[in-house]
Image: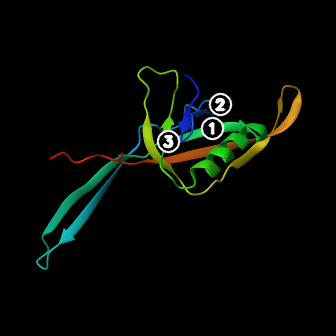
Amino acid sequence: MGLPAYYLSSLPSTSLPVSWDVISNPYAVTREQVLLETGRGITFEYEVFTRRTPTFIFTVSASQLAVFQTMHDAVVGSAFYFIPDVDASPQDLMHVRKEPSFLPEPIGVYLLNGQKEQFFKYELRLRAEITAASILD
């Protein structure tokens, strides 16, 4: 598996320093429904939309976490493109928004290249967005 990457429409793509963990869920889908009930108790369910809601889990050192912080600061709630695996063919390009919070969880201090370094678990929660479309006459 290759490295994931992201890019905003105005910037070149940026690869993340590590690949996501195998316990990630890149295939999650959320369905939103509206439930209407009449005065007589008849229920109607209408599907509003279905969207991908993947969660990618990364285990990173403090120095690698800086790249994720940079991504968090760069997207600032804007929709952006995320590529889970740049080596995949064809690439799975997703138009997404990132969760608004940046909450890495410390998991311990480990040796990295002979140096003690703090490691974190970071969950990247994404929500697929509908890309812009033009209406044809």
Q: CA distance from mark 1 to mark 3?
A: 24 Å
Instruction: Count how many numbered circles sit on residues in the image.
Output: 3
| Residue identifier under label 2 | 18
Q: Determine the residue positioned at 43% across, 42% down.
A: 95
Q: Give the number of the mark in front: 1 or 3.
A: 3
Q: Give the number of the mark in front: 1 or 2.
A: 2
| Residue identifier under label 1 | 58
Compared with residue 63, is residue 37 higher up or lower down, i.e. above or below? below
Compared with residue 85, is residue 73 higher up or lower down, i.e. above or below? below
Q: Residue furthest right?
A: 115
| Residue identifier under label 3 | 9
Q: Are marks 3 and 2 in contact (CB under 8 Å)?
A: no
Q: Determine the residue positioned at 46% across, 42% down.
A: 54
Where is residue 137 drawn, in percent x and y? Answer: 14, 47
Looking at the picture, tell me which residue is in the foreground, 118 or 101.
101
- Mark 1 secondary-structure assignment: strand
Looking at numbered disc 2 in the image, what kind of residue is underneath it? Val
Looking at the picture, tell me which residue is in the foreground, 99 or 118.
99
**Looking at the image, is mark 1 or mark 2 earlier in the sequence?**
2
Looking at the picture, tell me which residue is in the foreground, 127 or 25.
127
- Label 3: how many Cα within 10 Å (few below 14, some 14–19, many 20+): few
Q: Are marks 1 and 2 in contact (CB under 8 Å)?
A: yes
